[in-house]
Image (cartoon, rainbow, N blue to C red):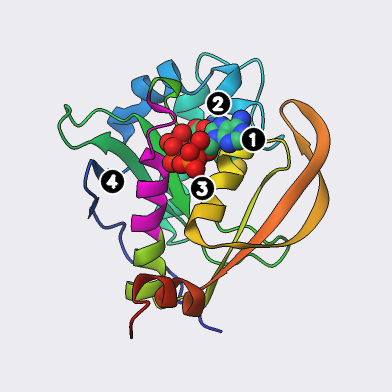
Amino acid sequence: MTFQVPLPPTPVLETERLILRPLEARDVPAVQRIFPQWEVVRWLGPAIPWPYPEDGAATNMAQCLEKRARGEQFYWAITLKDGDDELRGRIDLWPLPQDRRDMRGFWLDPLLHGQGLMTEAAEAVTAYAFDVLEWPFLYLTNAVENRASARVKEKQGAVEVGREPFSYVAGQGEKQVWLLTREAWLARQKPNL
Ligand SMILES: CC(C)(COP(=O)(O)OP(=O)(O)OC[C@H]1O[C@@H](n2cnc3c(N)ncnc32)[C@H](O)[C@@H]1OP(=O)(O)O)[C@@H](O)C(=O)NCCC(=O)NCCS
């Protein structure tokens, strides 16, 4: 198993409707405007302060940029291709940590939910992980109740491999752990080969 660190610089990724570009300090106002909504945060982890402070996005941005500078994590701003380069959501990717089976995170402006956009972003990031970085697998997680997030994983061909207790912003619960192997994902991309 190989996860080469430090990670390379975050590349720009393009999909049919999206441009995923590296997160930047100028995205703080958009994050502070969009992120602190109950339907965005409720199934996220307990590290997120709630109620969200006025400097929440700025504090988090500083931590993200430091982590990225150390080559530990990729952070993409999700922007609309026919839009104005404004951040509408975020998708993050990181190598397998020692202590938990979890390698990707995402959230999107609720105004854009249900259009298949996060599936599109997740596919682009997954292609980068498997085609370019040649990672062998992705472990993915979500709150059991978070059906939209689970559905993105199902659509990508991930397989549920376990459930674990977890705390959310919304309280105690269980998280689903999913595994998407490079082999399974590549087979789904090229079913005729
Ligand atoms: C999870 C999230 C990123 C999904 O974004 P999205 O762009 O709406 O996702 P997509 O449209 O690509 O796919 C969502 C799928 O979930 C389905 N879905 C949505 N809500 C659902 C529900 N309550 N029950 C069952 N399925 C649901 C949609 O129908 C769609 O599936 P389909 O294509 O088969 O119809 C978005 O809901 C979000 O930002 N949530 C808040 C943050 C979050 O929870 N992040 C994940 C943490 S693990």
Residue 175 image position (x, y, % from top left): 75, 47
Q: In this view, does 63 lie to the left or right of 14?
A: right
SS category of the residue bearing label 1? loop
User: Which residue is identified by label 2?
Assistant: 40
Q: Is mark 2 within 8 Å of ligand 1?
A: yes
> Which amino acid lies under the numbered mark 4 shown in the image of this protein?
Leu
Q: Give the range drawn in magenta.
A: 112-125
SS category of the residue bearing label 2? helix
User: Which residue is identified by label 1?
Assistant: 44
What's the CA distance linking mark 1 and mark 3?
16 Å
Could you say which quadrant of the image residue 4 lies in? bottom left
What's the CA distance linking mark 4 and mark 2?
19 Å
Categorize mark 2 by other alpha carbons within 10 Å: few (<14), some (14-19), many (20+). Answer: some
> Which amino acid lies under the numbered mark 1 shown in the image of this protein?
Leu
**Disc 3 vs disc 4: which is toward the camera?**
3
> Which amino acid lies under the numbered mark 2 shown in the image of this protein?
Val
Q: Compared with residue 57, is residue 62 higher up or lower down, i.e. above or below?
A: below
Categorize mark 1 by other alpha carbons within 10 Å: few (<14), some (14-19), many (20+). Answer: many
What's the CA distance linking mark 3 and mark 4?
17 Å
Residue 116 image position (x, y, % from top left): 39, 40
Q: Does the residue labelled 1 lie within 8 Å of ligand 1?
A: yes
User: Which residue is identified by label 3?
Assistant: 152
Q: Which of marks 1 and 3 is nearer the N terminus?
A: 1
Q: Which residue is drawn at 41% across and 39% down?
A: 90
What's the CA distance linking mark 1 and mark 4?
21 Å
What's the CA distance linking mark 2 and mark 1?
8 Å
Q: Compared with residue 192, is residue 82 higher up or lower down, i.e. above or below?
A: above
> Which amino acid lies under the numbered mark 3 shown in the image of this protein?
Val
Q: Is mark 3 within 8 Å of ligand 1?
A: yes
SS category of the residue bearing label 3? helix
Q: Residue at x 21, y 47 (%)?
A: 16
